[in-house]
Amino acid sequence: MSGSVIQVSDNLYIISTELLNTKNWLSTYLIIGDKGGMLIDPGPSVNIEALMEIINEEFSNIKIKYLGATHIHIDHGGGLGNLAKLLGDVKIFVHPRGVKHLVDPTRLWEASIEVLGDIALFFGKPQHIESSKIVGLEDNSGVDLGGITVRAIHTPGHAPHHISYVVEPFNILLAGDALANLYEGRVYPVTVPPFNFPEYLKSINKVASLNYDIISVAHFGYVKDNPDVFLQRVKDKAIAWASTISDLIRNGYDRPESIYDKLLEEDLELKFIVKFREKYKMFEGASYRAVLGMYQSIRELMKSL
């Protein structure tokens, strides 16, 4: 088995595989109710074999009946089609706007190659899923697992079709990419193109108003101690990036590469993450793509003023 299992609370686990010898790159969630298990964010197609190896070894007595994704970007939901074929009779839950892209992933795949390049080719092409297997989750709708409800909270910004999931009754938020990346206690926004800064801020404020006991992010892990402080850090960092980038644009910086270099000088958390996280192939260029998305969103906002 190549990977690890982290127990977050009763009946909730993070499963992490080790693609390209990278540890802790994606939080895949297994939630176990009386009616069966639900997997959220299984990762890309290339991840499914290792993921199922861990599940078959550690959770062989669990029948997985439900699949979900915080959003359909291929690093989160690209393997849903592969899993659906392996597991057979399952229901797949995504944002209503994501349903058509699971039925026909052509545009999703084209956009993935455009944004991720070679990493997309490594992750693998998402497979078509029969529409009868897919359910679009409206805001505040829930999936009954038996004794546990997984509730959808729409949190756009990172993507217009982004959902965070609340695990009840444990009051745990599975935030996906709605908030921030977390690495060795450092944070930076998950703002890859196409990105909407005003919607991102609204989603952060929405989450903050609901007072969760534990918050987990996709990349990677969870925060149990003072999640309200974590959320404030996330919001402060997003606003700081937006402010710095808008000032740079006003001062004549019009290339995202130069803005990225300036931001690296000012944001020591980002500098740390680039130095120690992006030495792994899986994360190459991740922080630049985040800055690019924030730059594009701020630039468009400034044009509209």
Image (cartoon, rainbow, N blue to C red):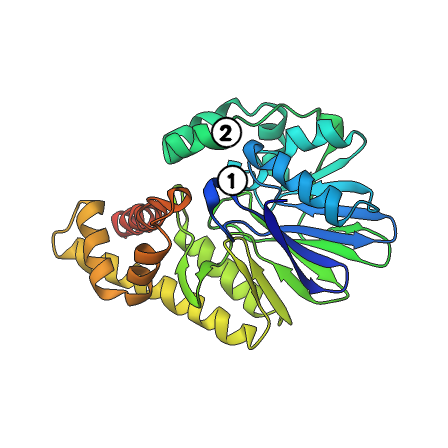
Mark closer to the observer (2, 1)? 1
- The quarter holding residue 185 reads bottom left
Tell me where residue 109 appears, x and y as whole percent.
48, 27
Residue 58: where, in percent of width, then height?
Answer: 74, 49
Residue 263 falls in image quadrant? bottom left
Q: Which kind of residue does numbered mark 2 sit on?
A: Leu
Query: Which residue corresponds to the image point at 63% horizontal and 25% vertical from the top-left?
Result: 103
Which residue is more in the foreground, 14 or 215? 14
Q: Quadrant of the N terminus?
A: top right
The answer to whether residue 39 is visible is yes
Place of residue 83 in the rendered image (x, y in percent of width and height, measured from the top left): 68, 33
Q: Which mark is residue 75?
A: 1
- Considering only vertical position in the picture, is 139 above or below 124? below
* Foreground pick, 13 / 148: 13
Packing grade of label 2 (10 A; few <14, some 14-19, many >=20) is: many
- Three-letter amino acid code at the position of disc 1: Asp
Residue 108, labelled with which disc? 2
